[in-house]
Amino acid sequence: MNDPESTRPIRTARIDWTRGGQPRARDFDDVYFSGQGGLAESRHVFLDHNHLAERWRALPPGGDFVIGETGFGTGLNFLAAWQLWRNTAPRDGMLHFISVERHPLTRPDLERALARFPELGDQASALLAAWPADLCRGCHRLPLAGGRLRLTLVLDEALSGLESLLDSAHPAHRRLRRGVDAWFLDGFAPSRNPDMWRPELLETLGAMSAPGATFATFTAAGAVRRGLAAAGFTVHTAPGFGHKRDMLYGCLEQAPALPAVSDFKTSPYPNGLEQPWHVDRTAPRPPHRAVVVGGGLAGCHAARALADRGLDVTLIEAREDLAQGGSGNEQGVLYARLSAHHGHSARFNLAALLFALRHYAPFWGDPEQRFGAACGVLHLAGGERERRHQAVIAERHGRQGLCQLLDREAASELAGMDLPGGGLWFQQSGWLAPPGICRSLVQHPNIRVRQGHVRRLDKQQNNWLLHDEHDEVLARAPLVVLACAHQLDGFAATVGLPIQPVRGQVSRVLLDQAPAARALRTALCGDGYLAPPADGALCFGASFLPDDADTSLRTAEHVENLARLRQQVPGLLPADLEASACSGRAAVRCATRDRLPLVGPVPDAPVMAARYQLLGKNARAAIAAPGAVLPGLYVSAGYGSRGLAYIPLCTELLMAAMLGEPPPLDRALRRALHPARFLVRDLARGSA
């Protein structure tokens, strides 16, 4: 998604309001819902003619269902489906709702539009609370209803947005691993918005559909009927709603067959098709049992996500308690590195931050526990170049309230103390206590935590066996997540993943020795980070030493942390405060060469090297073979110093890979995070 279209900012909907209070799209000169009863129309067209009530009552316990929609609009169809799901589906079922929208409504317009439907008030309030703080182009995953409903809102032109969710653009793999069960074909009338109904889009619906998928739409236009039939759907006519005489509904009797991989010649000469090295053709395993190795933020999030989906989970931690490694600091600041430039790293950081802000809101709002504080985060500008960079970020991402550019006076007032300059203010963010979050996440009846050192992995039939240092079997399961940071290099299956240990030391000073810090009201980030005081102390840091796995405290790094803090906030510490007054802790983070995480299936390196050896002759060689993975073995690692921000969204991606759920990110970002990416790059450079 680095094409010119993908780099343009999304434009929000331009709304006019009729005398009756209906929203009308200025660009299409059409209303969003019927004046004769918008909710009744949604139920008649989309819920009834996709037979959702009957299908949901027939779901087994723990069953799932996927709805796809063209045109989110005001979200009325989504809310109506949510209400019906709540009333008819199994209590432990999961509904995925995928919807694409080119011009999303701002939160105020959305709130005004949905106020017409008080019977949907609870659901509307939850949607508004989760509405993205930055309506940027791309995927926005919004978990709702305690995680039993997941809205994947794709802000993009309909065709490119839906195609970005497909497993691959290669014709032999052009599908959605978990297909759509029912389609809501909405959007404005074909005469007002023809792009929404073009044949290429309708053909993509077929590629994204599960066997037996149904559809319903308010229109009965001949071009739509013919396009759906050409895409493989049987099409029927039914009475429309209100003044509309007819509507269409139907089903996909048989999904279009994909061409075979053997139909495509393997050649060092490019054919312009996407290389599907990231495609996993193994069938998703039914939820049953899983093992997670590593008791830090990555492992605890993975364990909780699996347990919430009904799996029995064993979490194995080598140390005596959870969060004793890189996730063990008393305070961590939630931030991501936004950029004025476009690219995978910038887009991923933004998506991760937006998801994390929603994810941690319940932790900040928990009245019984203190997991941190939503005190805001101020990214300090270190110089004129950084100030210009921040100005571009604020212009691009601050329009809906994600961030705000502040001058020195405003920044100092918010921080509660005099600062040398301004910065970028993230009002919704704050600091968190990673150990407390880890302990909270594993409080689930499906999770069992045990202490042990996993030294070896062995595959036996459909199970992975995890052996300790005495070669005793600690656990066995068909699904294993390795979330053990730089210790990944201790396993034969993952020894080739290019991870790097990075030492970081945090310093801690008692408030009695730094009384001015009592006035600090917000978290600060720059070359280092500083959280507001907690438990009578001030925590700050951290050092950053690649290829250093030692965890003993060093006076030199306390000196470094103090010097950095004095430069960022000159009046905060007494002049005579020395390193001898500092306590703290050192831990080892795990980073990668490109500073993006490793999330997904572990590649079968020898098979991958054989399938993709032609990359050594031409990096764009024509190869149709899918990737090769070690079935049931997954990795979640490489988060560096941004685990708080990255891990929640990456856990969603991990669940999609493990269990075959719809993806939370577009294909370009999924490839950018895939554990096989380095192997493919090295093959292309001739170094693997």
Image (cartoon, rainbow, N blue to C red):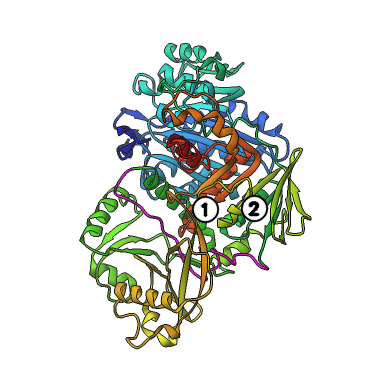
The answer, for residue 100, to whether it is visible in the render is yes
**Which of 200 and 489 lies nearest the eye of the viewer?**
489
Residue placed under numbered mark 2 in the picture = 303
Residue placed under numbered mark 1 in the picture = 647
The answer, for residue 216, to whether it is visible in the render is no
The N terminus, quarter of image:
top left
Please name the amino acid that badge 1 sits on: Ile
Label 1: few (<14), some or many (≥20) within 10 Å? many
47 up-or-down from 334: above or below? above
For the stretch drawn in magenta, what is the main secondary structure?
loop
**Which of 510 and 316 lies nearest the eye of the viewer?**
316
Q: Of all residues shown, which one is farthest toward the right?
A: 472
Q: Position of residue 266 (x, y in %)?
A: 50, 20
Chain part drawn in magenta = 320-342
Name which quarter of the figure residue 244 lies in. top left
Please indicate whether residue 629 sits to the left or right of residue 578 in the image. right
Q: Position of residue 393 (x, y in %)?
A: 29, 52
